[in-house]
Image (tube, rainbow, N blue to C red):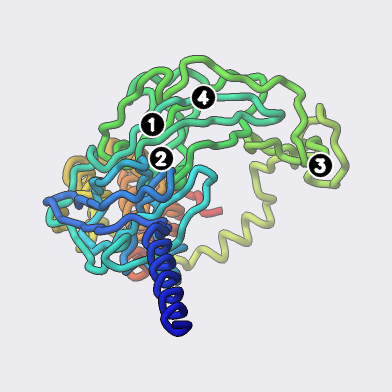
Amino acid sequence: MKKLSLLLILFLSAALTNSQDQKTEVFAPFVSRLKAKVQDSSIMLTWRPSRDVIGDRLIYRYTEEISESNFKWAQEIARAASDSNSYIDSPPDQRKYYYAVLLEDSDGKLYKLFIPYRNITILGKAISILPPEEELAAQVSGIKTEVMDDSILISFRVSKPNRELLLFMSTSPMRTAEDLLKAPSPLLLDANTTRYQDYPIPDQDWYYAIIDAGLFKIGKSELFGGVNTTLTPVRLPMGIGRVGFPDTSKLRPLPLPYLLITSGVELGDELSPFSPFMLPERVSMLQSSTSEALTRILSDVPSPSIPQMKAQVLTVDRALRAGGEAYTLQTILNGKFLKGKFKESEDLLLKFLSIRRSDEIENRARFYLAQAYYFQGRYRQAFMEFLLAEDRYYQIIQPWLDACFRCLWKAGETS
């Protein structure tokens, strides 16, 4: 009888425990059934939402299957709401990409769990057609400026955090694309930037505009007052000190608009802020003995012959590309450069170089800019531009440097 009672107690205890386990909910802070499907120029991501964490869903992209070891290199491309179950990505190129969708709670805690077939993809997906730049571009909105001590803080919002932006600043309002071309060279802002601290010249009105770098490259940037360009000027008061810096009377003021010379050139005497630069007096004529010595030395030196140079296009730029910065450069070459319109080519190349380019493209553009200077007879400027591209195209540039030097020699500008 005792054995039967004991067995009955054990059976009831096991049944009660099993019943409690069934009622226990499993905490699963991750989405499930993440899938990626190629749609020509985009990739559609779908997943089953999770109810365990209320907060944003962070979407990441990388060129390898995303894991804990390489997560720090994965790129956050978007944030989605808690109840979302899809996202359309437009990759910038045709490489294979892998994706992860992670959960972030309302306190900002990110659950770094990487589970195949649930919240990460294990097969790379590549688009078959490159999307137009307009689809890739980020829209900038909510631009604001605020004076903070000795600086101006520019804040804004972007629709796509993974895009590079261009920050323009000017002393006059920027309302059209033509205004951007008249403004000084823009500053390239890294992806995921939503604010920038500027140190402009005090006691001067400043206006700012921010646009997608890719749109500016293809000439399709648009400005909207109060959205991505400021219409109200902002100004730093005169006499404001630079926080955290030593006495500015001995330094060049940010952002280096001119050079302050604090000592005399010849004797090194300290100058007051209102003293003249005291540069050495220019000597226009050589002494007679020096002139006679130079004449004897050069009497047996034949006058240098100037080679006949022709406009030269590198092999890599002869085959027209489908798009990108190389295509823009080739458009300049085919449109003006090869037609001998070197002044127009100079203007276009300077605008092309006004924003950051890859090292390869910049070297090629400077090679053509140097030629544009050369054929306008501006040999000194041409010489300096050729030097900037010499490391990349050493053998090609040597004849050009020699031609520039001979032209400068003949014009008496080599001293």
The residue at which mark 4 appears reads as 144
Q: Give the number of the mark in front: 1 or 2.
A: 1
Q: To which residue does mark 1 refer?
A: 140
How many neighbours does mark 1 have within 10 angstroms: few (below 14), some (14-19), or many (20 or more)?
A: many
Q: Which residue is mark 2?
A: 165
The type of residue carrying mark 3 is: Pro
Q: Secondary structure at mark 1?
A: strand
From the viewer's perspective, is 99 left or right of 300?
A: left
Per the model, the C-alpha gap separating discs 1 and 2 is 9 Å
Q: Which residue is mark 3?
A: 246
Locate residue 230, reporting x and y percent: 47, 20
Residue that sits furthest to the front in the current view: 1
Location of residue 225 with respect to 49 vertically, above or below? above
Instruction: Check disc 4 and give the amino acid type.
Output: Lys
Q: Nearer the viewer, residue 227 or 243?
A: 227
Where is residue 351, by image quadrant? top left
Residue drawn at 52 percent across, 36 percent down: 195
Q: Amino acid type of disc 1?
A: Val
**What's the residue at 29%, 58% (across, down)?**
32
Residue 150 visible in the shown view: yes
Q: Nearer the viewer, residue 32 or 293?
A: 32
Looking at marks 2 and 3 on the same chain, the residue that comes earlier in the sequence is marked by: 2
Determine the secondary structure under disc 2: strand
Counting residues from the start of the chain, the first of labels 3 and 1 encountered is 1
Q: From mark 2 to mark 3, how far is it between C-alphas?
A: 32 Å
Question: Residues under labels 3 and 1: Cα distance?
Answer: 37 Å
**First reached walking from the N terminus: tag 1 or tag 2:** 1
